[in-house]
Image (cartoon, rainbow, N blue to C red):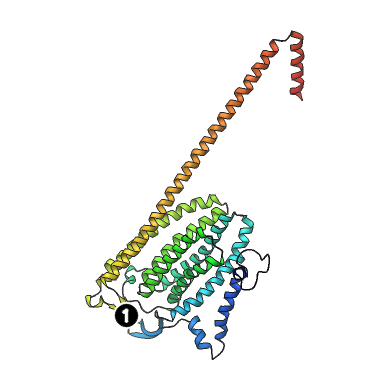
Amino acid sequence: MVAKGKKTKNPPILSHEFVIQNHADIVACVAMVFVVGLMFQISSPLASVFIALHHNVSAPVEIQPGVFQDFTFYTAGVKDISAVFFYLLISVVMHAIIQEYLLDKVNKKLHLSKIKHAKFNESGQLLAFYIVSLFWGGDIILRENLLNVSALWEGYPHNNMTFLFKFFFIIQISYWLHIFPELYFQKTKREDMASKIQYATLYLIFITASYMFRFTRLSLVLLVVHYLAEVVFHTCRILAYAERTNISSKLFRLGDLLFVLARLSSVILTVLTFWYGLAQAPMEQQVVDLATGNFNTGLFRLNALVAVCLLQAWLMWNFIMFQVKRMREAKAYDVSSAANAAKARKSEQERAKARKARKEQEEKDDTDLPEVDQNTKKSLRQRVSAK
């Protein structure tokens, strides 16, 4: 499986070019080692550490009034690191599959420039991940009944997670980690690295922190809200590169509205959870307890609240600066278009004046000729105009 384009030559084995061209095959082979390890009794325990989710517990759940049944839940733990590593490999393979079998084929039809080609690929990869995460996260919200705002803080610490709930966070961390090796595999230009490293690092810091400190419910809702705005934005960008500007221009307005609403709703939910909801817990429960996973203290809540609000403010500032820049570019384009139109009108007027002056000069020259020559010249002009 080739990362970009077709192979034009066979590079030396284990050279940089060889690894880049065949990185998906190499990573897939490493992942298959763990999968095949599950088939043998001697290696199955070690392989399951990387593939399966661990730290499972049983807890009674009331299914009917007075009737309890034990269900299996999962908690956060050290073994999650090995699972993150394995699904990081899977993310690299899926990235290459989407690139080769979907994005590259579309790129060939669009004939984009190198700059647009790179941005189209980035938006295509992110859009695929955002859509999957959006539907997956929305399904968990409905299953866990998180549409009730009070559920974001009730029952904290939220140690017990269902399989899909925990797997969602493992995939989130794995995906944003895989961005870093992809910088090498995709031959990302140095000037494009900073922005990718920046947003991948921010995702990792906030998602990992919420997972470790048991704020997973709030994190899930905020991610779904954020991903909804991102889905619309990257859809608009792909449509714009595909020259469907009549659709993308309308969707861009919707995307701008959703972005602002996402920032506003994220701040509101964060303030409700950290400033109001978790502060209602009894004082004896507002302590740091690593054994129970309790981090509900005033200092933790304040730091988490400030961090999320600063992130939303930074995103909003970048959004405003982007809109100002776009308005300036649009204004400059309108001014240049008006100047070009005025210049064109002026040139047309000058040409008309020149034609008029030339005609007057010809008529003047004719009057200076004898009458016979004037009639001869006039007949010659009539013949030329008739032809």
- Identify which residue is drawn at 54% across, 36% down: 340
| 184 sits to left or right of 12 | left
Determine the secondary structure under disc 1: loop
Residue 1 appears in which quarter of the rendering?
Answer: bottom right
Q: Is residue 147 above or below residue 335?
A: below
Identify residue for label 1: 290
Residue 200 seen by the camera? yes
User: The disc labelled 1 sits on which kind of residue?
Assistant: Leu
Q: Position of residue 206 (x, y in %)?
A: 39, 68
- Residue 147: % across, % down: 37, 68
Residue appearing at x 76%, y 22% in the figure: 384
Q: Residue at 43% of width from left, 72% of height from top?
A: 140
The answer to whether residue 301 is left or right of residue 5 is left
Q: Quadrant of residue 64?
A: bottom left
Q: Which quarter of the rendered picture does the C terminus lie within?
A: top right
Q: Is residue 300 left or right of residue 128?
A: left
Q: Residues within 10 Å of mark 1 (few under 14, many from 20)?
A: few
In the orientation shown, which residue stands out farthest toward the left?
283
Residue 320 x %, y %: 40, 52
* Residue 124 x/y as whole percent: 54, 62
User: Which one is in front, 256 or 363?
Assistant: 363
Give the total of numbered labels.
1
> Residue at 56% of width from left, 63% of height from top?
187
Front residue of this view, candidates 181 and 65: 181
